[in-house]
Image (spheres, rainbow, N blue to C red):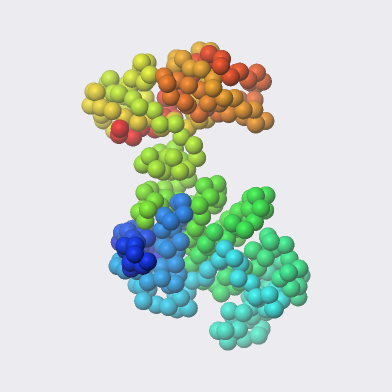
Amino acid sequence: MYLTLEKLTKTFPPRGGAGEVHAVKDADLQISQGELVTLLGPSGCGKTTTLRMIAGFEFPTSGRILLDGKEINTLPPNKRDMSMVFQSYAIFPHLNIFENIAYGLHVQRISKSEVERRVGAVLELVELTGYEKRAPNQLSGGQQQRVALARALVMEPKVLLMDEPLSNLDAKLRESMRTEIRRIQRSLGITSVYVTHDQIEAMTLSDRVVVMNKGLIEQVGSPVEVYRYPQTRFVADFIGRANFIDATVTRGLPGQLAVQVYGQTLHLSNVKEVYSEGARLILIARPEMILVNSQGELPGIVRRASYLGNMVDYDIEVGGQLISVVDTDPRHTAIHAEGAAVGVSLLADCVHVLPG
C-alpha cells in the first residue's frame, strides 16, 4: 500500500482541569496509490487530527505512518512530499495569482523557466489560464479555491491532503467544485486524503469512505458499502437517513431468514449470517427502501406528509413507531393525507440486518 496508518494514536495531555483527550485511537488504514479516501464524521471525531498527523502538523503519541514503504513519523511537514489545501484557502492577499501559485516553487529555488511551465500547466488544469495577474480579491470564492488547489498541485506532491476545502462556499458552488476536484484528482491520478463532515461530499468524491466516531474508525468501504451495508448503528444513522426496526428471528437458515416485525413475518433473502431462532435483530431500512400503498402488509397511519417536488416525504406510524418513508415514484400524483390509513412494505432485498 502507498500510504499506511498502523495503530495510529493521538492523546492530548490534561488541560484546564480536564483529563487526557484521546483524539485518535489505534487507527489502521491502507490507501492505494491514486486513490481518493475521505475521512468522514461529526465534529470532534478525530478526522482532522488524523489528517494533521499525516501532514506532520501533529506527531502521533503511538503508531506509525508509512509513505511508499518508508516511516515518516518524525519528518517535518516540508520533508513529507505532501501538499495541503486548507479550509481558509490561505492565499497571500499581496501577491497576484501567478505569484501565489509559484510561491512554494520559489522557496525550493526552482528555475524561472520551470516555474513558468509548471504554473502554466496547473492554471490550465484548474481552468484559470488568463488570471495570472489578477489579485485574489478580484476572484470569486470558487476561483480562490481553485488557486489554493493549484498551489498545492504545482508542487507535484506524492499525496494531496484536503481539510474541508469547500465549507466556505455556498451550496451550488460546493456542488460544482466537488466535480472539479474529482476531475482533477482523477486526471492526475494523485493519492488524496479528504476530510469532511458533509455526507454528500464524501459519497460523491470518494473511492472509499472512512467513517470515524469518537477517535475510532467505525467502517471503511466504498460509498455503496457504507450506505447499503453499515457495520454499526452509528454509521447507518450518520450517513443518510435510516429506520431502526426491532425484529425477532423465527427461522434462521442461511439465505432464508424469517423475522417477526410488528406481528407480521418478513422473509429476508440477502442475509448471509446465521441467526438462531428467537434472536433479536435490528433491521435498517432506508426511507426510499420502504413502499407505502394500500396493499402493504404492515398497517400504518400517516402522521406527516411533505410534497417536495421530486418526492413525497412521509412519517408513518407503524406499531407505535414513526417510520420515515420517501416515495420517489413520479406516477404517484396523489398524496396520502395526514391521518390516512395506509399499508407499508419493507423491500426485503434492501433491508440490512444488525445484531440486536
Instruction: Name the one closer to the observer, 353 or 156.
Output: 353
Above or below 25: residue 68: below
Q: Is residue 352 left or right of residue 150?
A: left
Question: Which quarter of the rendered picture does the C terminus lie within?
Answer: top left
Picture coordinates of residue 67, whole percent (x, y): 39, 69
Above or below 97: residue 41: above
Instruction: Name the one closer to the observer, 267 or 280.
Output: 280
Above or below 104: residue 279: above
Q: Can residue 224 be seen? A: no
Q: In this view, does 13 lie to the left or right of 150?
A: left
Question: Which quarter of the rendered picture does the N terminus lie within?
Answer: bottom left
Q: Can residue 298 be seen? A: yes
Picture coordinates of residue 8, whole percent (x, y): 33, 63
Name the outermost residue toward the front.
17
Count of marks, rendered view: 0
Picture coordinates of residue 85, whole percent (x, y): 56, 66
Which residue does the image show at 36% across and 67% down from the upper left? Answer: 15
Which residue does the image show at 60% across and 57% down from the upper left? Answer: 166
Picture coordinates of residue 137, whole percent (x, y): 73, 69
Which residue does the image show at 60% across and 71% down from the upper left? Answer: 90
Which residue does the image show at 50% across and 65% down from the upper left? Answer: 161
Above or below 135: residue 220: above
Residue 183, quarter of picture: bottom right
